[in-house]
Amino acid sequence: MIITPIQVHQSEQAKNVILSGFLERFGFIDHALNPDIHDISSEYDGTQHHFFVGKENENIICTGAIRKKSEDTYEIVRMSVLAPYRKRGLGRIMLENLQDKARSLGARRLVLETNKQWADAITFYKNNGFTYMEEDEVSCYFEKEIPL
């Protein structure tokens, strides 16, 4: 898999990767809940927020992004791997790429949230060094300190 910053012409394909994961998990898609993916190239313009795609044979098979929350904190968002490509370590590779990018931008802490019914996602983040912080009715929240 080759990971690159998203290009404008890849936005629709990346959006479809994300939405396919939602459809698989929930059985439906509520487009109102995900306004940031309607115009990925504007929302993630590479200044404060950065969006990456993982490609194999020019097909986008994996996505991930970081959003600046404060001077030293970035949020991991839009992690998705197409179903046929899971269990190959691609999510871990994307997560490492996001962490490295955040570190290069001065981050010392990463945060993220995931649906609390996504047991595999929760296990994935715990296995990759994230610490469970809290939960609400829908989500679990995690953080990870980035060493200097």
Image (tube, rainbow, N blue to C red):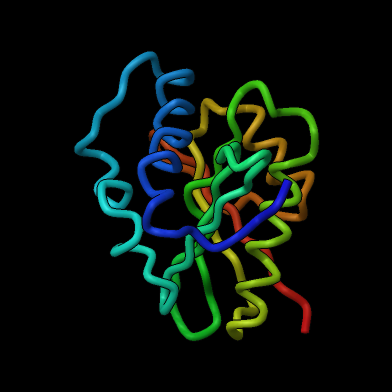
Q: Position of residue 73 (x, y in %)?
A: 53, 75
Q: Residue at x 29, y 43 (%)?
A: 34
Residue shown at 30% from the left, 25% from the top: 29
Q: Position of residue 77 (x, y in %)?
A: 49, 53
Quadrant in the rendering for residue 16: top left
**Going 30% across and 52% down the picture, which residue do you hit?**
36
Q: Please provide percent x and percent y for residue 89.
A: 79, 39
> Viewed as shown, does residue 90 lie left or right of 44?
right
In this view, the residue in front, 11 or 58, is 58
Residue farthest front in this picture: 57
How many labels sit on residues? 0
From what the image shows, is residue 70 above or below residue 78? below
> Which residue sits furthest top?
27
Placement of 95 over or under 81, stated as above or below: below
Answer yes or no: is residue 13 visible: yes
Quarter of the rendering occupied by the C terminus: bottom right
Position above or below: 21 against 53: above
Residue at the image position 63 percent from the left and 62 percent from the top: 98
- Residue in front for this viewpoint, 118 or 83: 83
> Is residue 134 visible to us here?
no
Is residue 101 rendered to the left or right of residue 89?
A: left
User: Is the residue 32 above or below the residue 69 in the image?
Assistant: above
The image quarter in which residue 95 lies:
bottom right
